[in-house]
Image: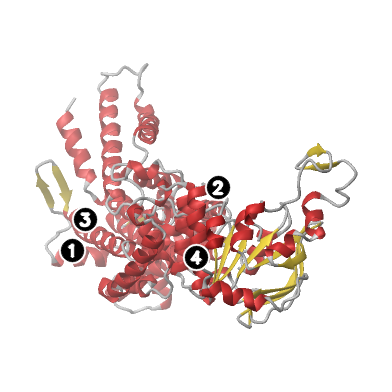
Amino acid sequence: MYAEDMTTVDLPGRQRAREAFSSVAPEAGAAKPDPILVADNVVRRFGGLTAVDVGHLEVQRGAITAIIGPNGAGKTTLFNLLTGFDSPNSGSWAFNGRPVEGVRSYKVARLGMVRTFQLTKALARLPVIENMRLGAVGQRGENFWRSLVPWLWRRQEQEITERADQLLARFQLDTKREDFAGSLSGGQRKLLEMARALMVQPELVMLDEPMAGVNPALKQSLLTHVKQLREDGMTVLFVEHDMDMVHDISDWVVVMGEGKIISEGSPDQVMGDPKVIDAYLGAHHDGAVKTVAGQEVEAGDTPPPQVSESEQR
Amino acid sequence: MDFVSIFNAAVTEMFGPTLLVYALAAIGLNVHFGYTGMLNFGQAAFVAVGAYGLALMVVTFAPMWFPGLAAGAVFWLGILLGLIGAVVLALLLGVPTLRLRADYLAIATISAAEIIRRVFRSSTLREWTGGSDGRSGFADVFREYGMVFGFDRGARFSWGPFFYTGTQLWVMVVGWILVGLTMLVVWLAMRSPWGRVLKAIREDEDAVRSLGKNVFSYKLQALILGGVIGALAGFISGLTTGTVIPDTYSPQFTFFVYAMVILGGAARVFGPLVGAMIFWFMFQFLTQALRQLSVQGILPPGVLDPTQVGPIVFVLLGAGIIALLIFRPQGIFGDRREISLDVR
């Protein structure tokens, strides 16, 4: 599906990321040469259910890291915890060496760690361009008293608008500039949300299922955009179910199951890991009858998640 | 049946002091509900706090605390107390509830408005607040200011269908200036990045948080701004009659104001003013027309008894608002495209 990407000349950001990972052991909680985000013993319980129990996680700077895992593995909860949208029962984590546990979500974003949401949050009754402008930080006109005196913020607003227009052009949303965000298609909303997050000028972009509900053509352009983020020096951490995408763009994959990190490694390493196959299909899958997605199946009916031949090198 | 005099009376009300009270309260509520999406069901409380702040300072507190202070200074201290009261009320309501889901603010505000009204009218505090009779005798300084500009107390002003006393006209001069100024502030603020954050909060709080904005602080600021504009409505309310009566600020007041905001078109600068004018005109016209029809026996007592006029007007206005929500949910100034969007 994405075979043409494989033939293109390797990009410098990608090469740098791949080299950095060459010395990293493919095991859960592996140390990275230059981590931008380090988390330790993050635990979140909902009543009796332990949704997240991550012992140690490091995210390499300048690389694209994917978090995969079956439904209910705690991926989105981990995202919520790391970005301050939820509070853990215990745990600590640091962004750029600065402890950020207990820091409010809006302050986490200002530090340069910006997320998107699984259910897209386009600001429906604001035009696309206003969605974009909102993303810029440090706006003088966002103070009430200064807002009443337009000439105090008009110039900054022009700079912000120029930056927003460039991003809209890059994400092919420039023709939708004046439309209400609520009139965009699901895929376009995903693009808008990503472009809006970039207005914050983040160091770490956290995407929660960027491909969910996006048609194949738009998927292709989203992939290109995510790869470009790495080339621009940003770090990307994303949650995704689309294995083609994970295999195509990620430099490193973290696999979660029942709240824990069960495996880490390059996409090929992870997809061959029996622990990962167990997590998705249940242990002892080569024998007894198991249930998959609530339906009883014979082992072998459902192949483990793997990529087609054309994409394997 | 004198339709001309009924029409004249209704048009006079449409620009008069009571309209200004509703218009200012609606402009404030539009900041809460229209722009920020906060469900404040206690706008009457902000109006009451403004009116009582002024009245209690002049009648009750100043003679105790600052005996001998000039009447003019006491009046301005009263204005200050009303404004501070609105800010304090916004903080009391907002700080505990604005981090929670939107409905908690609605519950807190509607209860707080009733608590405030009942505290003002309680017989225990009669010594200070005057109980259910309220307070009067605090508008003299204001009326003297009016006389400086030639608005004599006993004068009658009549022009076309309009008919006002000097006292009313002076209140209207000040009131319309306040309406103009507050609309200017709302217009300037809402076209700025500050207003953009408020509108974004109305759409989705978490998205705004994820972009590095302190949502709680912005909601509190919006609550204070709309509340202070509500307090201005309270000053006009008190100064028109020279009396504050607790039952003026009942939940019905808030629901009238909601109807006006929705009628005019939420999140539009002119929406609350025009909505208030149309609503108040209709209310006055229907009340007086139906009363005449009934009193003169054109509608026999079996069909409409004079005591039924009040309730029937509410029924008709309610039906009108339902029709409006069906056929023009965006209000007069709203944008149909906007309202038909799938917000999630």
Query: Of callouts 1 and 3, which one flags the residue occurring earlier in the amino acid sequence?
Result: 1
Chain of the residue under the numbered disc 4 shown in the image: B
**Residue tagged by mark 1?**
B146
Distance in Å between CA atoms under marks 4 and 1:
43 Å
Numbered marks: total: 4
Direction right: furthest residue:
A288
Counting from the top left corner in percent of width and height, residue B191 is at 31, 62
What amino acid is found at the position of numbered circle 3 in the picture?
A: Met
Quarter of the rendering containing residue A293: top right
Distance in Å between CA atoms under marks 4 and 3:
37 Å
Of discs 3 and 2, which sits in the foreground? 2
Counting from the top left corner in percent of width and height, residue B299 is at 29, 18
Residue at 77%, 65% in the rendered image: A263
Whether the residues at callouts 4 and 1 have beta carbons within 8 Å, the answer is no
What amino acid is found at the position of numbered circle 2 in the picture?
A: Gly
Q: Are marks 3 and 2 on the same chain?
A: no
Residue at 22%, 57% in the rendered image: B176
**Residue tagged by mark 3?**
B172
What amino acid is found at the position of numbered circle 4 in the picture?
A: Val
Q: Tag 2, which secondary structure?
A: loop
Q: What number is the disc on residue A167?
A: none
What amino acid is found at the position of numbered circle 1 in the picture?
A: Gly
Q: Is residue A34 left or right of residue B217?
A: right
Query: Of callouts 4 and 1, which one flags the residue occurring earlier in the amino acid sequence?
Result: 1
Of discs 2 and 1, which sits in the foreground? 2
Chain of the residue under the numbered disc 2 shown in the image: A
**Residue tagged by mark 4?**
B215
Quarter of the rendering containing residue A163: bottom left
